[in-house]
């Protein structure tokens, strides 16, 4: 199982790099950019702890999944709340955020034992809602020539669809190949995670490098106009 673990570390490394990139370029950015920055940094901390505990004590890191999914749901709900321009959608996102957190809080208070295992309801509800938000964003912006956070939302949808499918199908321990490497479903989930990080990098380029290129091009045009006068 060493090879799949190495692949997961590659995804973790790309997450760290993306977090650093967003953090270093956070100056004068909007609230959406800052939400993603916090999301990436805290997600790296959770993922790092999960991988470390999973490596040292296999099977004893399940409880960290709650922090992962709940934090991701809160951060991305705030993201979509701010990115949606329709008031009705904003209200839905805000209502569902509060409702889901209350529901999960009640669930854990009734049955504390689920803290030490995967919570399928938690995974299903949070993932499916975020996928729905992402699809709505893409639908409302598909006709635009250029839309910020398009790459990010595509990556989020693909990754959440992959991970949620594995969890909810009950195939988290299934082995697909045994030669030349022992590969399970988590290996392919790690590949989708790497793709997700690549799309986040593409988003970072759009939000930073391409804006800079546009400014430089505009400056060149202004200089050319001044020289022609």
Image: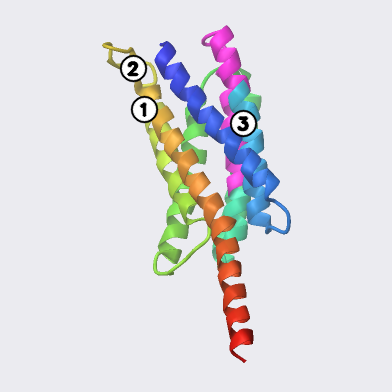
The residue singled out by tag 3 in the image is 44
* In-front residue for pair 102/48: 48
Does residue 23 appear left or right of residue 53 in this picture?
A: right
Q: Which dot marks residue 183?
A: 2
Can you name the residue that lies furthest to the top here?
57
Lower sequence index among marks 1 and 3: 3
Magenta range is: 49-76
Place of residue 2 in the rendered image (x, y in percent of width and height, measured from the top left): 43, 11
Q: CA distance from mark 2 to mark 1?
A: 8 Å
The answer to whether marks 2 and 1 mark residues whose Cβ atoms lie closer than 8 Å is yes
Place of residue 85 in the rendered image (x, y in percent of width and height, measured from the top left): 57, 67
Does residue 189 appear left or right of residue 202 in this picture?
A: left
Whether the magenta-drawn stretch holds residue 63 is answered as: yes
Question: In the rendered image, which quarter contains the N terminus?
Answer: top left
* Picture quadrant of residue 209: bottom right
* Picture quadrant of residue 20: top right
Q: Residue at x 59, y 74 (%)?
A: 220
Lower sequence index among marks 2 and 3: 3
* In-front residue for pair 186/9: 9
Place of residue 77 in the rendered image (x, y in percent of width and height, measured from the top left): 59, 49
């Amino acid at each position: 199982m060493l090879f799949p673990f190495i692949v997961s570390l590659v995804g973790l490394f790309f997450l760290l790099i993306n977090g650093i990139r967003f953090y270093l370029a956070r100056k004068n950015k909007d609230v959406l950019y800052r939400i993603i920055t916090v999301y990436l940094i805290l997600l790296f901390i959770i993922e790092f702890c999960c991988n470390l505990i999973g490596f040292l004590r296999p099977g004893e890191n399940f409880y960290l999944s709650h922090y992962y999914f709940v934090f991701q749901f809160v951060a991305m709900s705030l993201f979509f709340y701010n990115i949606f321009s329709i008031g009705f959608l904003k209200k839905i996102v805000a209502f569902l955020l509060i409702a889901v957190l209350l529901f999960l809080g009640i669930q854990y208070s009734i049955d504390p034992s689920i803290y030490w295992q995967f919570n399928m309801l938690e995974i299903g509800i949070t993932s499916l809602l975020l996928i729905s938000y992402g699809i709505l964003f893409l639908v409302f912006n598909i006709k635009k020539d250029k839309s910020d956070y398009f790459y990010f939302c595509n990556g989020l949808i693909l990754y959440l669809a992959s991970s949620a499918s594995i969890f909810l199908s009950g195939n988290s321990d299934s082995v697909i190949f045994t030669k030349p490497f022992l590969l399970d479903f988590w290996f392919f989930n790690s590949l989708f995670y790497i793709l997700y990080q690549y799309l986040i990098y593409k988003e970072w380029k759009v939000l930073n490098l391409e804006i800079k290129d546009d400014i430089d091009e505009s400056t060149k045009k202004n200089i050319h106009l001044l020289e022609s006068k």
